[in-house]
Image (cartoon, grey):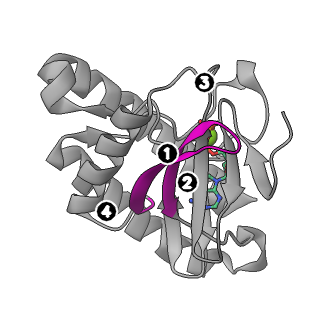
């Protein structure tokens, strides 16, 4: 289906521009994720710090017959335009904030795209004028839901992905 004002189609969902400040992630019949759960996880992370994109509201669009997760619109910039020293500062803040989310019981789980899927390797990490931000909490996990053992495993994987991202972000 063709949507007006489409920004991008990720692995699962189409995202459309709503205004200069808002975008909407569309959930249609064939979407494999659940909007309520994604909204709750986003709100959880938003209470801890500023790293995950801000949740705004849930809506239903009659015209395109889709559930819509409305969130803050990020305007990504290209890291290759900035000196490595500046990127290193951005990365340090990112690492601190991600670790803070882990300590609070939130793990993102989708920093790095599996090679088998293809596309950009870190497309859920967006660089903005105010630093690095995370989108797409579709498969994120909360410790209170998955329990300590699974959560620790997820954090271990995420720490490795964070290292891979550092290498990519500082050396390209
Ligand atoms: N808040 C946002 N601001 C700007 N662009 C966004 C935003 N959220 C998503 N996008 C764009 O839409 C794409 C798909 O969104 P994403 O949440 O990653 O869905 P998927 O689960 O399909 O990967 C992203 O890769 C990005 O290009
Ligand atoms: Mg994505």
**Could you tell me how far apart the alpha carbons at marks 4 and 2 are, in whole angstroms?**
13 Å
Earlier in the chain: of badge 3 and badge 4, it is 3
Label 4 residue near ligand 1, CB within 8 Å: no
> Does the residue at mark 4 contact the one at mark 1 (Cβ under 8 Å)?
no
Q: Is residue 144 left or right of residue 134?
A: left
Q: Which label number is shown at residue 96?
A: 4
Provide the residue designation for mark 3: 31
Magenta residues (range):
53-71
Find the distance from the CA under tag 4 to the CA under tag 1.
Answer: 13 Å
Whether residues under marks 1 and 2 lie with C-beta atoms below 8 angstroms apart, the answer is yes
Instruction: Tell me the residue that label 1 is attached to.
Output: 163
Q: Residue at x 58, y 37 (%)?
A: 112
Above or below, comparing residue 15 to residue 22 in the picture: above
Residues at marks 3 and 4 touching, judged by CB atoms closer than 8 Å: no
Mark toward the start of the polypeptide (4 vs 2): 4
Q: Is residue 86 left or right of residue 98?
A: right
Closest to the camera, between mark 1 and mark 3, is 3
Q: Earlier in the sequence, mark 4 or mark 1?
A: 4
Measure the alpha-carbon separation of dots 3 and 4.
33 Å
Q: Which is closer to the viewer, label 2 or label 3?
A: 3
The residue positioned farthest toward the front in the image shown: 62
Provide the residue designation for mark 2: 166
Which secondary structure, mark 4? helix
Please say whether residue 135 is visible from this viewpoint: no
């Amino acid at each position: 289906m063709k949507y007006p004002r489409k920004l991008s189609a990720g692995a699962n969902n189409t995202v459309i521009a709503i205004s200069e400040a808002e975008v909407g992630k569309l959930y249609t019949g064939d979407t494999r994720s659940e909007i309520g759960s994604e909204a709750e996880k986003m709100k959880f992370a938003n209470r801890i710090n500023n790293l995950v994109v801000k949740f705004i509201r849930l809506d239903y669009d009659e015209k395109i017959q889709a559930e819509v997760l409305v969130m803050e619109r990020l305007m990504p910039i290209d890291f290759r335009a900035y000196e490595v020293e500046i990127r290193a500062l951005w990365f340090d803040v990112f690492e601190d904030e991600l670790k803070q989310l882990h300590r609070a019981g939130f793990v993102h789980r989708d920093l790095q795209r599996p090679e088998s899927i293809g596309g950009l390797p870190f497309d859920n990490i967006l660089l903005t004028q105010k630093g690095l931000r995370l989108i797409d909490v579709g498969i994120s996990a909360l410790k209170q839901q998955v329990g300590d053992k699974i959560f620790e495993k997820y954090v271990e994987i995420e720490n490795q992905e964070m290292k891979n991202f550092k290498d990519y972000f500082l050396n390209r």
